[in-house]
Amino acid sequence: MLFVDFDNTISCGDVLDALIEKYSRTSEWKKWQTDWQENRISTFECLRRQVGGLELDKDTLLDFVRHVAIDRDFVHLQDWAAATGTELVIVSDNFDIIVREILTHQGIALPTIFANTLTFEDKRVIPSFPYRSPTCLRCAHCKAIHFATYRGYRTLYIGDGLSDICPAMRADRVFAKDSLAAYLLAQGKPFTRFGSLGDVVRVLSEHAPSRTGAGPS
């Protein structure tokens, strides 16, 4: 199983940050971001406030995210997964409607996606967090819970940030950059550093499993 984060891993830059900065009806989002970074509020509470503070309708949101660039090597990562019989799953603290729109607009075949959800009432945006764990203050989407669905499979994880810590600490092999890499280094958790998904594809291709060995161990 190959689990992949979305923002700043598949996408080029943080999509939510750009969206909030442009469409928030209050400058309080900056304070909430600082409070989250300094562990005064949880990821869930930060996102609930920031997304709840957006003022835009669904069409405006979709039009904005269509212009987001992605790492073009994501398609090569999908090719590697298909060739080796590895299931690729996106796990994101972003929202499913955003992830799907970006990939679809880029002509990317959609894999399984686990993400938060949005509903709209005129120009009010209402976030929901179906995969939140009430016992974990770090995550609004507890990405590691999806590992249980694939128990018995070897887990590979690719990510970059604080929301990737929980799954990265549990995965069999991790590719990390930025703040996730710094955290894993401090914790002594082995990982492979990457700059782009092309780096990941090159490493995986050197140690590609056969299709017959891709199922449960």
Image (cartoon, rainbow, N blue to C red):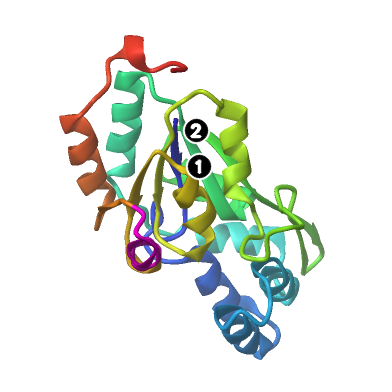
Q: Which percent across, then down, holds residue 122?
A: 81, 65
Say which residue appears at 30% left-offset and 20% top-offset.
83
| Quarter of the image where one finds residue 67 | bottom left
* Magenta stretch: helix, strand or loop mostly: helix
| Quarter of the image where one finds residue 52 | bottom right
Identified by mark 1, the residue type is Ile
Quadrant occupied by the N terminus: top left
Residue 10 image label = none
Real-space CA distance between mark 2 and mark 1, rounded to the nearest whole angstrom: 7 Å
Q: Which percent across, then down, holds residue 93?
A: 59, 57
Q: Are marks 2 and 1 in contact (CB under 8 Å)?
A: yes
Range drawn in magenta = 180-189
Q: Which percent across, then down, holds residue 65?
A: 52, 60
Residue 41 covered by magenta stretch: no
Identified by mark 2, the residue type is Pro
Which residue lies under the disc numbered 2?
111
Residue at the far top: name it.
212
Which residue lies under the disc numbered 1?
90
- Would residue 107 be seen by someone viewing this image from the given angle? no
